[in-house]
Amino acid sequence: MVAVGEKTRAFRKLHEQGCFVIPNPWNIGSARYLEKLGFKALATTSSGYAHSQGLADGALTRDQALAHFRDIAAAVDIPVNADFENGFAHEPDAVAANVRLCIDTGVAGLSIEDFTGDAANPLYDHDLATARVKAARAAIDRIGSAAVLTARAEGVLHGCSDLADAIRRIKAFAAAGADCLYVPGIRTRGEIEAVVEAVAPKPVNFLNSAALGLTVTEIAELGVRRISIGGALARVAMHAFIKSATEIAKYGKFDSFDGIISNAQLNKFFASEI
């Protein structure tokens, strides 16, 4: 098993140049398969894991999330970034305390967002959001970890603020010590370029969780350093499951089983991973 420090150093190095895809597993099996495909790092998905537990996104407790991070980080030899949502706390000191717990799970990085979880008041105000990032940075530094801190501006994703506000926020987050900046919800080339330019030379994570018509090469050419896909792979799996189960329940048909991967193939793969 690769040591946590080695994973963390490798993760930080990935952000220094080029562009890499960081896919999002939702359990140990999907994590190990993604590693086997050659991806250099993984990121957890709050939605994918929550749905696998029969919960809505945002309904996980802090301790459930931490246990999940620990499981995924221990299952693979490549770096894992934790989707730590809003840090499971509002005030900066509480965020810092929880960040320390997150780092203890063995992850190589984590993201903190400015979404409150309250649909009626979705974003922390600018100053508090920035203070939360600063507290997360200080917590990582006090531990002496090289973990990568990603700060997320969530307004575009939640339809409660525009790109200009998101850019103002990520600039402040960068100044507060975030290593990587992230504006989920942007979709066009112009939006991507504006975000990249705003915080250059710091790296930007781009969420490509829909069929936007952009390839990895094209996204890289826009200056993006890291491409994540959120809960998309988990939704692909759930979509296939729902479609197949619905076909059986409504029509008594099993046609969706045609051509699927065999039990023997999966046994062979996972046996080789032990």
Image: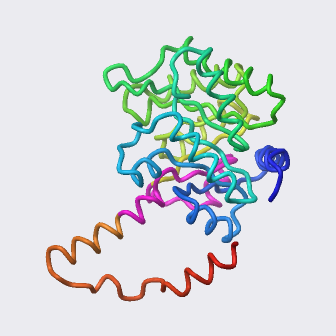
For the point 67% across and 59% down, which residue is it?
75
* Residue 38 belongs to the span the image colors magenta: no
Is 224 located above or below residue 84 in the figure? below
For the point 76% across and 52% down, which residue is it?
18
Residue at the far left in the pictured view: 250
Tell me: 4 left or right of 199. right
Tell me: 54 left or right of 253. right
- Measured as percent of width and height from the top left, residue 244 is found at 29, 74
Residue at the far top in the pictured view: 127
Instruction: Kindly indicate the quadrant of the structure image that contains residue 16.
Output: top right
For the point 71% across and 53% down, which residue is it?
19
For the point 45% across and 59% down, which residue is it?
234
Magenta residues span 210-238
Quarter holding the N terminus?
bottom right
- Measured as percent of width and height from the top left, residue 119 is found at 33, 26
Closest to the observer, 94 or 206:
94
Quarter holding the C terminus?
bottom right
Tell me: 163 left or right of 238. right
Render colour scheme: rainbow
Closest to the observer, 145 or 111:
145
- Measured as percent of width and height from the top left, residue 205 is found at 62, 43
Is 259 located above or below residue 210 in the figure? below
- Measured as percent of width and height from the top left, residue 6 is found at 85, 49
Instruction: Kindly indicate the quadrant of the structure image that contains residue 215.
Output: bottom right
Is 68 located above or below residue 116 in the figure? below
Is 252 located above or below residue 126 in the figure? below
Q: Tally the numbered discs.
A: 0
